[in-house]
Amino acid sequence: MVSIKKAGLTFIALAVFAAALTAVSAQTPNISEAAGQTADSVRYNEAYSLVMAEKWAEAGKALDAFLQTYPKSPWVDDARFWRCYVMEKSGTPAEDVFRCYQQFVKSYPESEWSDDAKSNMLRLAQQLAKSGKPEYEALIRTIDRESENEVSLTALRALRDIGDKKAVQALVDLYDPQANAKFRSRIVSVLEDCEDPLVVKKLMDIARTDPLVEIRAEALSAIAGSHSAEAFTFLRDFYRTENDADLKRAAIEAAGDIGDPRNIPFFKQVALNETNEDIAREAVSALDEIKGQEAAEAAQDILAKAKSFEVREAALELISERKAGDVLPLLKSIALKDESMDLRRSAIHMIGEQKDKRVLDTLKEILAAAPNEEIQGAAIEAIAESGGGVAKAFLLAKALESEGEEPGRSAVQALADIAKPDNTAILLEVYKKAKSRDVRLTALEILADHDEDEIPPTKLLIQIFKEEKDPDLRQEIARALGETKSDDAVPVLLDAARNDAVLRVRTAAVSSLGRIGTPKAKAALLEILKKKEPGAES
């Protein structure tokens, strides 16, 4: 099958050729316009068309320029392949061309041009061997062997799928630690789907001895596919004896995939004793792969005894998501009493996610007992997440009654989020009725930062701007007037820009005129720039 990328090249080459035939027109059609190409693909296709036209010198320069200008383009592998091809056609020595293709295959093993490059390498190696360079004979054998291996692997996969027992042994024998990494990885992938004891034994050998950590990790994952006690024993012992942290974590992850409740004590032990937090968390995740109450009980024990916040949080998430029994009292206890403020916040968030009619009352109790603004804010957010009219009414009352900065400000912010898209009315109510100046200021700040489709009421803002005396509040109202994009706001903003006693209010008014941007607003800005009449305020 021809790939989309290669098919696209054919289309572009034809497009370029057709454009050349229409040279009678005053302007050659733009390829990017005709084919909807990005800038890098246009440049690449121009170079490719020169290759197709066999203009080798020009093609080489164009490809070099492309590679220098667009080093991260998805067309880089194509350009590098054709650069090798152009070298050969330009009379570059065969050894240099061979090395060019060799480097290409090494750098882009997954490229759709990789097989073409290998074919060209084989042809060049044969030419060089015949010309008296015997060292290329060994390279020929290597290339041939790699090609044969790919064919053999495909054939053996097919035989395995139809139940041929000899194919299993052949697959095992095909693995060679000296083969290229891509091929070794493919062998592991094919072996993963086979539960034959011979295969599991081979995967264990690969996990212990392959030169690459990535392939060893793939083998560990494949071992778990047998879901056997032998597989778990190997993975457990591998974890205990291996020094590489990534491989230890991979062993725990693979062991978790087996999903056997008998392995719970091991995962619990790792979660509690492992000093590497990533590995310890992986052990908790392994518990999550095991069904039943016993895994949830182990997580509760980890939550109570683990020292790491990361590990305890993972255990808490498992318990919360399992919903094994009534978890709300446990979450409430952590939210109120735990020594870790981070874990308290996590517990509060989880409470907000529970589908339980007691959630709102629980969060209110936590809010009332919160030792600091951080926990207060978390409780307010969780109340907002719990949703519903009762939560909204509670947040509004909290915003209006708060006498300090918190939790009133958090309540206003939460209200603004849950009341979208039409939260203007509730924000104005907070501005008018809140006891706290900080809370009123927060409501105005949110009004001033409205999205484009949420336009504040201009006339009402003008009225409260005229009545408000507090400079900070006037500044925010001026900003909100700019968001209205209304000419009705221009006169009051112009007056404020010229006459307000406070500099930051005047500056906010000028900025808002700029945001409005209408001819009337522009005229007002020009008016501000005029020299003031004698006797005007400075």
Image: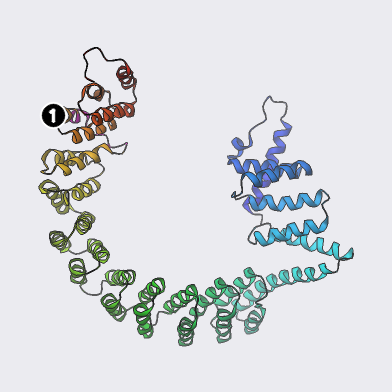
- The image quadrant where one finds the N terminus is bottom right
Is residue 457 a member of the stretch shown in magenta? yes
Mark 1 neighbour density, 10 Å: few (under 14) some (14–19) many (20 or more): few
Q: Amino acid at mark 1?
A: Glu
Residue 199 position (above or below residue 98): below
Q: Which residue is mark 1?
A: 467
Point out residue 370 in the picture as x, y percentages from the top left corner. Answer: 16, 60
Q: Answer left or right for 42 relative to 272.
A: right
Q: Answer left or right for 504 relative to 274.
A: left
State the SS at label 1: helix
Point out residue 30 in the picture as x, y percentages from the top left corner. Answer: 63, 33
Is residue 257 a member of the stretch shown in magenta? no
Q: Quadrant of residue 182?
A: bottom right
| Viewer can see residue 480 | yes
The figure's colour scheme reads rainbow
Q: Answer left or right for 163 relative to 309.
A: right
What range of the chain is rendered magenta? 452-461
| Majority secondary structure of magenta residues | loop
| Viewer can see residue 296 | no
Between residues 273 and 286, which one lies in front from this camera angle?
273
Q: Quadrant of residue 24?
A: top right
Instruction: Identify which residue is drawn at 13% across, 50% down.
Output: 398
Point out residue 509 in the picture as x, y percentages from the top left corner. Answer: 26, 28
Between residues 218 and 524, which one lies in front from this camera angle?
524
Residue 347 position (above or below residue 220): above
Point out residue 538 in the picture as x, y percentages from the top left corner. Answer: 24, 20
Q: Answer left or right for 524 relative to 329.
A: right
Between residues 322 and 93, which one lies in front from this camera angle?
93
